[in-house]
């Protein structure tokens, strides 16, 4: 019996069997086997989600053998990335072909398939989450058949598959819409919260901008990136803490050695700062002592994936970080109603308490998503009890 532990250690389970297929045929056979036995099958990437998306007592797949960028197309800036590759590995390989992703999240150790599957995002008002790169996909559906789809031929279905958490099929390869390689300049400053708030609209004009707020000191760290040196602002009201430049895949992500648990909500842009100020008030009043760490605020461009948390809304995310190993639910559950009051949608891969009843009210195209999902997986082979609660019924 092999125990599965996510990155922070807050989600632990024992799958019935861990499988590491080496060929597409083996993936098809495993799905057929699970379906014929009435069992469930989930695929795990790098274990960086802390919601139990991959939890199963039946089959858990790792596709770590599916690697190596294929078919680079330098005219249309596209390439195919097999699903065993991490964001870091894909970034390095793509760079060799003169291609780059438009953004990454804060780290690059997730698999790109896992990151796309949950709508993982970085920051930047003009930059959509990573799933927006998904131009086409080769996958195994719930009947164990290989299906190939692309935005050219099946744009509506692709909008369902874009953020689907392995619930429609097991992705094998992803055709991505990329960009020519580019350099980034990065600067980080320590500023007062007041200065950060007063200059927010200007700060948002940078290609990438986000900020951490530290409850104990009421100070912020702002992080800014641009493609041209001339566009880098000189922040006279802050102290410069870091300055770097290099190819985008090296500059966008950071290393993380301190482990933490996280709740992140995606808010409609116009309501987000009111929400942040209310969260801040609550944190200062009740949690300043035990929340030793920080909150992260980011901006993200809207997309049109059916159940992407940024679907149809220019968005701002607010995330609560709490050191791994410490009790976090009392804090997260106290703040979650504030996110909900302001129209927040939870990040699919982080802690939240929502189930189908609440989630379906948040997504105007929820029904269309569920219908497409059902077509690909008629026997519900990918729907574990948690996924059932999330998508179908809380009862
Ligand atoms: C330290 C840290 C930093 C993070 N930073 C950010 C950030 O900056 N921005 C952000 O938005 N999120 C962030 N996250 C969340 C993280 O990006 C997501 O949870 C992501 O989904 C994790 O990818 P993974 O490879 O670990 O996949 P998993 O967590 O293992 O899986 C995620 C989902 O993808 C599905 N999946 C995986 N592979 C496949 C496949 N081949 N076919 C179909 N479905 C598949 C799984 O079934 C599951 O539903 C962070 C998490 C951590 C721990």
Image (tube, rainbow, N blue to C red):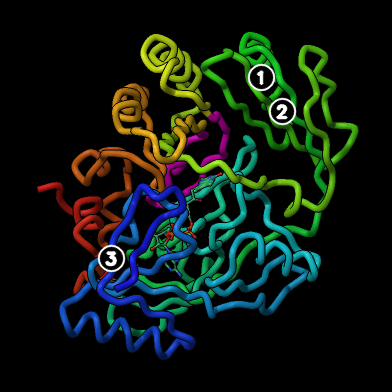
Q: Residue at x 45, y 86 (%)?
A: 24
Q: Residue at x 19, y 42 (%)?
A: 357
Q: CA distance from mark 3 to mark 1?
A: 48 Å
Q: What residue would you read off at disc 2?
A: 205
Please tell me whether the stretch drawn in magenta is mainly helix, strand or loop.
loop
CB atoms of marks 3 and 2 within 8 Å: no
Residue 93 position in % (x across, y down) = 72, 69
Discs 3/2, front: 3
User: In the drawing, does residue 50 fall left or right of residue 301?
Assistant: left
State yes or no: residue 310 in magenta: yes
CB atoms of marks 3 and 1 within 8 Å: no
Q: Residue at x 43, y 38 (%)?
A: 262
Tell me if residue 148 comes above or below residue 216 in the rendering: below
Magenta-colored span: 296-315
Q: Residue at x 50, y 18 (%)?
A: 273
Other residues around mark 2 within 10 Å, as few (<14) / some (14–19) / many (≥20):
some
Q: How many marks?
A: 3
Q: What residue would you read off at disc 3?
A: 14
């Amino acid at each position: 019996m092999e125990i599965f532990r996510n990155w922070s250690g807050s989600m632990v389970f024992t799958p019935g069997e861990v499988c590491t297929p080496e060929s597409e045929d083996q993936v098809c056979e495993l799905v057929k086997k699970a379906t014929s036995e009435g069992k469930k099958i989930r695929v795990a990437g790098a274990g960086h989600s802390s919601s139990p998306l991959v939890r199963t007592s039946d089959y858990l797949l790792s596709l770590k053998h599916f690697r190596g960028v294929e078919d680079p197309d330098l005219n249309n800036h596209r390439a195919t990335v097999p699903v065993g590759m991490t964001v870091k590995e894909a970034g390095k390989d793509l760079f060799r072909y003169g291609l780059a992703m438009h953004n990454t999240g804060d780290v690059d150790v997730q698999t790109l398939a896992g990151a796309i599957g949950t709508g993982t995002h970085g920051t930047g008002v003009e930059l959509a989450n990573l799933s927006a790169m998904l131009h086409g996909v080769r996958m195994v559906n719930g009947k164990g058949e290989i299906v190939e789809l692309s935005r050219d031929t099946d744009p509506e279905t692709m909008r369902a598959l874009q953020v689907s958490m392995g619930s429609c099929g097991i992705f094998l390869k992803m055709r991505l819409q990329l960009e020519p390689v580019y350099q980034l300049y990065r600067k980080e400053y320590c500023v007062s919260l007041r200065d950060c708030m007063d200059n927010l609209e200007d700060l948002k004009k940078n290609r990438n901008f986000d900020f951490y707020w530290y409850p104990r000191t009421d100070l912020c760290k702002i992080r800014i990136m641009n493609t041209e040196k001339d566009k880098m602002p000189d922040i006279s009201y802050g102290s410069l803490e870091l300055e770097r430049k290099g190819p985008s895949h090296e500059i966008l992500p950071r290393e993380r050695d301190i482990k933490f648990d996280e709740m992140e909500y995606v808010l409609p842009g116009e309501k987000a700062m009111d929400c942040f100020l209310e969260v801040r008030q609550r944190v200062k009043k009740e949690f300043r002592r035990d929340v030793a760490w920080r909150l992260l605020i980011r901006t993200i461009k809207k997309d049109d994936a059916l159940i992407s948390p940024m679907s149809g809304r220019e968005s701002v995310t607010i995330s609560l970080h709490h050191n791994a190993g410490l009790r976090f639910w009392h804090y997260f559950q106290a703040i979650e109603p504030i996110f909900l009051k302001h129209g927040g949608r939870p990040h699919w891969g982080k802690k939240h308490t929502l189930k189908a009843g609440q989630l379906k009210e948040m997504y105007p195209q929820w029904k269309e998503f569920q219908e497409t999902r059902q077509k690909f997986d008629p026997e519900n082979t990918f729907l574990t009890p948690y996924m059932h609660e999330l998508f179908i019924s809380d009862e």
